[in-house]
Amino acid sequence: MLKYGEANPLAVFGLREMTHCPPHFTRVEFDLRANEKIISDWIWANLTGRFWYGDWYSKHEDLVNMQKCAAFEIAGEASMFALILDQINQNNFFDI
């Protein structure tokens, strides 16, 4: 991780963020409340493996639901992201 002074070879060669979601990646689906950049910056700064981040569409009966999704090649990173998600995915636009 770069914040510890180590360069990630996947990031150096542009192979860390995927343009599509491979089927073997572990997905974490969520409703976006924060800015997308906050989520992606946290992933880049705190995790080391390959990931995909984008829109995820699911169909339930006749309804189509769109959520944000982050998918990780390393299942442990998906677990870490899911555990921290409620702290970084907060609506800070309307503080009461």
Image (spheres, helix red, strand yellow):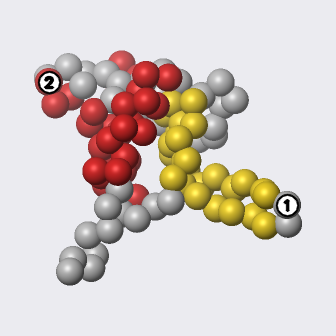
Q: Residue furthest right?
A: 62
Circle 2 sits in a helix, a strand or a loop, which is it?
A: helix
Q: Is residue 52 visible?
A: yes
Q: Give amino acid for label 2.
A: Tyr
Tell which circle, 1 or 2, labels the residue nearer the N-terminal end. Answer: 2
Q: Residues within 10 Å of mark 2 (few under 14, many from 20)?
A: few
Say whether residue 56 is left or right of residue 82: right
Image quarter hosting the N terminus: top left
Q: Which mark is residue 6?
A: none
Q: Residue at x 57, y 37 (%)?
A: 27
- Residue 17 image offset from top left, x and y in percent: 48, 36
Mark 1 highlights which residue?
61
Q: Give yes or no for contact between labels 1 and 2 (Cβ–Cβ under 8 Å).
A: no
Q: Give amino acid for label 1.
A: Glu
Q: Residue at x 20, y 80 (%)?
A: 96
- Residue 76 image offset from top left, x and y in percent: 43, 22
Circle 1 sits in a helix, a strand or a loop, which is it?
A: loop
Q: Residue at x 58, y 41 (%)?
A: 19
- Image quarter of residue 49: top left
State how far apart marks 1 and 2 are (Cα). 47 Å
Say whether residue 73 is left or right of residue 39: right
Seen from the viewer's position, the closer of residues 63 and 71 is 63
When the figure is inspected, residue 55 is found, relative to residue 50, above or below; the finding is below
- Which dot, 1 or 2, sits closer to the camera? 1
Seen from the viewer's position, the closer of residues 82 and 17 is 82
- Image quarter of residue 4: top left
- Residue 75 image offset from top left, x and y in percent: 50, 23
Seen from the viewer's position, the closer of residues 54 and 95 is 95
- Residue 80 image offset from top left, x and y in percent: 37, 31
Say whether residue 68 is left or right of residue 61: left
Q: Which mark is residue 4?
A: 2
